[in-house]
Image (cartoon, rainbow, N blue to C red):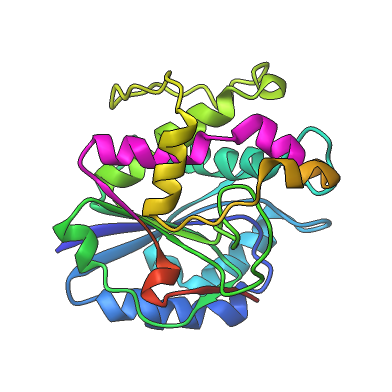
Amino acid sequence: MKDVIIIFFGLLRNASICFDNIFENIIKYNEKNYNIKYLFSTQCEKNQSKEELTTQINNIFGKDNIINILYQDIPNQKGSLVLDANYVIMRRLRKAMDYLENCKNYDIYLFSRMDIKINKPIDLNKYNIDDIFTIVTSFKPVRPCIFHNRDWDYLWIGSKKAFEIWYYSYIYGVSRVKEYQKYDYFTVYNKLKLNLEYNLSFEEKQQISNNYKLIEMKKQESQNMWWLARDFERYDSMYHKCIKNLLLNNCNFELSEYNNLYAFLI
């Protein structure tokens, strides 16, 4: 059997009413062919102890399939002039990927919030056959945003190769943010020896957007929304470079919405 790791990240929130959906549509649906384990990259909520959170996670997810629970206190980026969502996402993922360096090799990786549901089963066989990276996008809201007009940080899925290429490309982009260069959170050894230091032309970015039906607001339209203007300044072509790096290494990329697969935040 192939081995799969699901990295559950962020706060527990509504996991107790969401996990049955993930269990039925991913874990149980694929259990005949895949050995699926869970790793958590999380933190306690206000006035909650690690012991209390550990008990909650074990009760909801079942302790037999949990390889570890990694704790890391990260400040909330909401309303921050400096911190953004990528700061939080990459610190959560970095913690998990560093831990997995010393574990067995997993064939397929999932990186999932704990407070989501999906609308239909996901067949993991496609990631065993081909090196694919999938972003499971939100059903709604559809809104102006950098990179794409749906939330795209709910659930990521990839073969080992595709997931690692996305991870190294993404965290490199975050490491180049001026305000984050004083931290070592995002300085990662590029074990795949990917070429990450290059410029992406406007024409290349447009071609990638067209090929994968990315719907991004125009940069000039973001000026009245300070957080989007900041993110354009920091990450204008980063996501497109992540996709290009997948393609350069014989991997594929997809947005799930074009296969009628969506995630719902609960």
Residue 118 at least partly seen: yes
Residue nearest the observer in this picture, 197 or 66? 197
Q: Main secondary structure of the magenta part?
A: helix
Q: Is residue 29 above or below residue 219?
A: below
* In this rendering, position of residue 223 left or right of residue 13: right
Residue 219 lies within the magenta run: no
* In this rendering, position of residue 179 left or right of residue 71: right
Give the magenta-colored segment's residue range.
Answer: 229-253
* In this rendering, position of residue 1 left or right of residue 172: left
Q: Position of residue 121 (x, y in %)?
A: 35, 80
**Is the C terminus in the top left, top right, bottom left or bottom right quadrant?**
bottom right
Residue 239 lies within the magenta run: yes
Residue placed at 77% from the left, 58% from the top? Answer: 48
Residue nearest the observer in this picture, 135 or 30? 135
Q: Which corner quadrant of the image does residue 191 belong to?
A: top left
Q: Which corner quadrant of the image does residue 97 belong to?
A: top left
Q: Position of residue 100 (x, y in %)?
A: 37, 41
Q: Position of residue 185 (x, y in %)?
A: 58, 27
Q: Position of residue 256 (x, y in %)?
A: 41, 67
Residue 104 at least partly seen: no
